[in-house]
Amino acid sequence: MTQRSLSKDLGIALGLTNLLIRRVAKKGWVKVVNIRPNRVRYLITPAGIIEKGRITREYLDNTVRLYTETRERIRASLQVISHQWSDADRAAAGVGDYKPVVFYGAGEVAEIGYVSLQGTDLRLTGVVDDRRTGTFFDFPIDEPAALRAATLNGQPFGRLVVMTFKQAPQIRVQLEGLGFPAERVCWLHPTAGRDAASPSPRSTS
């Protein structure tokens, strides 16, 4: 592998790639071996292998911690949504043993949300996303324009749950432009707890 191919794989500039290689070599994680006057080979050292293992373990630990924290925040939000299910939601969704919701968003947060729905009386009936297409598990991903006040593609639902923490401001603008009722939108809050979900975007920070 050359520095040029490495920079392409990493998506960073060639000069930055050279700088980073020199830094890890200075730390003793990589050994520089001269092959020819105009060519060198970089070999990972025992210290570099240990450091690689430490970084990998730290990354996995952080990933597991982040997933666990996110799952708990979403679970708390879903519990609040279920508890706050209103007569208007029942009228819109029809009478049944479960409470149908639609996800706005089909990314990683939505995937955790889908798993978190299990064991609740909320049921996913549709998904919309303004960037992704295809399917979300067994659900086709629709454009937000397909939303109506109480239905998605003719399928009734009670609440629209926005499955994102970072894109909420942009989605608010999108939903306002579509004229979707604000009182039927639930937003995931940054922290879990009693008020982990809000039925109105105007009540969130």
Image (cartoon, helix red, strand yellow):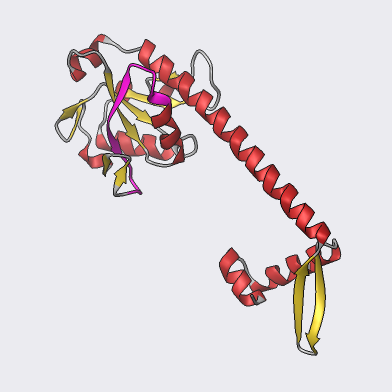
Q: 181 or 105: nearer the eye?
A: 105
Q: Is 154 located above or below residue 22 in the figure?
A: above
Q: Position of residue 132 (x, y in %)?
A: 34, 48
Residue pictured at 29% horizontal, 45% vertical: 135
Query: What residue lies at 24% left-to-right and 13% top-to-bottom?
Result: 97
Q: Does the magenta stretch include residue 130?
A: yes
Q: Which residue of the protein is positioned furthest toward the bottom in this rendering? A: 37
Left or right of 102 in this view: 78: right
The answer to which image quadrant residue 181 occupies is: top left
In front of the other: 15 or 96 = 96
Q: Can residue 205 be spotted in the picture? A: no
On whether residue 33 falls in the magenta region, the answer is no
The residue at 83%/57% (across/down) is: 47
Q: Residue 28 in the image: state x and y as whole percent.
A: 85, 63
Quarter location, residue 117: top left
The region drawn magenta spans: 116-132
Rendering coords of residue 167 (x, y %):
45, 39
The reply to whether residue 86 is visible in this rendering is yes
Percent from the top left, x then y, of residue 54? 74, 47
Residue sitting nearer the eye, 75 or 198? 75
How many callouts does the rendering have?
Answer: 0
- Looking at the image, residue 49 sits to the left or right of residue 62; the answer is right
Q: Residue furthest left?
A: 154
- The quarter holding residue 61 reads top right
The quarter of the picture where the N terminus appears is bottom right
Between 139 and 199, the one nearer to me in the picture: 139
Is 34 located above or below residue 113 in the figure?
Answer: below
